[in-house]
């Protein structure tokens, strides 16, 4: 998938655990884990906003577009 989720990188930079972020953004540990591992198919803007607020970052710090090689 050409969208890379760098949530784990931002969490490490902010020294924040998944449990702590889960509490701050009011999402289940499971849903955040799915997002963190890149298995999510979508994210709500309200969720992205809450994560950015909790981590004091921009959406581009969490989401990255990488072009797939041509087959």
Image (spheres, rainbow, N blue to C red):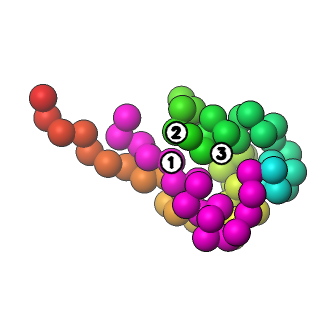
Residue depicted at x 87% and y 51%:
23
Q: Earlier in the sequence, mark 2 or mark 1?
A: 1
Secondary structure, mark 1, is strand
Q: Which residue is mark 1?
A: 5
Magenta segment, which residues?
1-18
Residue depicted at x 42% and y 43%:
3
Q: Which residue is mark 2?
A: 38
Secondary structure, mark 2, is loop
Residue depicted at x 61% and y 40%:
35
* Cα–Cα gap, marks 3 and 2: 17 Å
Q: Residues within 10 Å of mark 2 (few under 14, many from 20)?
A: some
Label placed on residue 68: none
Q: Quadrant of the N terminus?
A: top left
x%, y% of residue 71?
12, 29
Q: Is residue 10 magenta?
A: yes
Are circles 2 and 1 on residues that touch, CB within 8 Å? yes
Secondary structure, mark 3, is helix
Q: Earlier in the sequence, mark 1 or mark 3?
A: 1
Q: Is residue 43 among what the camera can see? A: no
Q: Which residue is mark 3?
A: 45
2 vs 49, nearest the viewer? 2
Vertical comparison of 65 with 38: above or below: below
x%, y% of residue 36?
60, 44
* Cα–Cα gap, marks 1 and 3: 14 Å
58 vs 34, nearest the viewer? 34
Q: Nearer the viewer, mark 1 or mark 3?
A: 1
Residue depicted at x 67% and y 39%:
33
x%, y% of residue 48?
66, 50
């Amino acid at each position: 998938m050409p969208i890379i989720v760098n949530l784990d990188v931002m969490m490490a930079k902010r020294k924040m655990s998944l449990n702590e972020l889960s509490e701050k953004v009011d999402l289940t540990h499971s849903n955040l884990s799915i997002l963190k591992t890149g298995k999510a198919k979508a994210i709500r803007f309200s969720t992205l906003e809450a994560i950015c607020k909790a981590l004091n970052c921009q959406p581009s710090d969490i989401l990255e577009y990488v072009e797939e090689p041509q087959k």
